[in-house]
Image (spheres, rainbow, N blue to C red):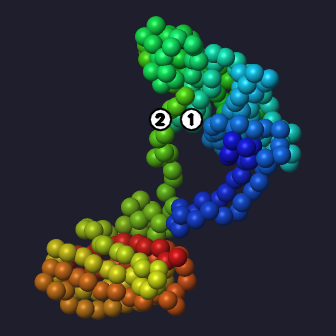
Amino acid sequence: MASTGVIERYNFDRCTGLFSNRQIYSTPSSIFNNLWDFEISPDESKFYAYSIYQGAFQNLAYLLQFDFNNSNFIASADTLRVFSDPERPGSLKLAPDGKIYSSVFSNVPDGCSDYLYCSSTIDSTNSNLSVINFPDSLGSSCDFQPYSFYLGGHKAYYGLPNNPNYELDTLHGSPCDTLTSVGLNDLFPKNKELKLYYDKTWQTVFVNAEELQGRNATLEFYNINGQLMERISSETDGSYFSKSSLFSSQADGVYIVRLSTEKEVLVGKFVKW
């Protein structure tokens, strides 16, 4: 989303870190501009955004809801609330309870800067958060309640904490989730750090490990489907191990590296690109 009114959506591959499948929902020529912040409902069917600096005096702002399930995304826009000075909408954030919370800045001309209210600047706008209670629901059924979550005497500005979603499900059976995927820890147990570095220019992966136990080492490379690509057997150099492998003939993607001795197993992954 951009301030010019552009709204685009992409697929994100958690394995490769790449974006794909670009979908354009609105362009700079659309009626919505000065888009400030956005959030998507838990079931990914609704899109919420603030459009700010509207009106002849640029003192209005709109909380908009769009419906991804509507074939005409722009036409699905529903204005849930119109804000006017001193209300200045800030951030939208989906919380673990499934609700979307919003901060609104109180633009009171009290001689203080935007991010340092005067001690006397206390009102319902900056001492509460607004809440979308049912963000999966369409229109007024989403139950937007302005200034309904009391901050216990604290004040809100434009922003909210930018916490990532730590509750993403595991990629079951995928090497991209080596700590939590079902069955992967049993196949590739991890004891110590395996240091991997892929050099794109040389198309070579460098493998290093230290404080190893055991003298005989086996180094194995697997693709994302679990297919063995290469196996190298070597003795360790005391407690150290260092090898490289040319990957110029392999396809781009994620690879799993397994280093095993007669006493332990180390596992890591790298991306060829």
Callout 2 amino acid:
Pro
Callout 1 amino acid:
Lys
Mark 1 — residue?
A: 93
Residue 32 x %, y %: 78, 38
Residue 267 x %, y %: 34, 73
State how far apart marks 1 and 2 are (Cα): 8 Å
Instruction: Please tell me which residue lies in front, 157 or 213.
Output: 157
In the picture as drawn, the residue positioned furthest to the left comes out as 238
Q: Residue at x 58, y 32 (%)?
A: 91
Q: Residue at x 16, y 86 (%)?
A: 237
Residue 99 in sight here? no
Asked which quadrant contains residue 33, the reply is: top right
Asked which quadrant contains residue 105, the reply is: top right
- Left or right: 231 as drawn, with respect to 12: left
Which tag, 1 or 2, sits closer to the chain's start?
A: 1
Q: Is residue 152 above or below residue 76?
A: above
Residue 223 in sight here? yes
Q: Residue at x 75, y 56 (%)?
A: 23
Residue 134 x %, y %: 66, 30
Instruction: Please tell me which residue lies in front, 66 or 260.
Output: 66
Mark 1: few/some/many CA within 10 Å (<14, 14-19, 20+): many
Asked which quadrant contains residue 39, the reply is: top right
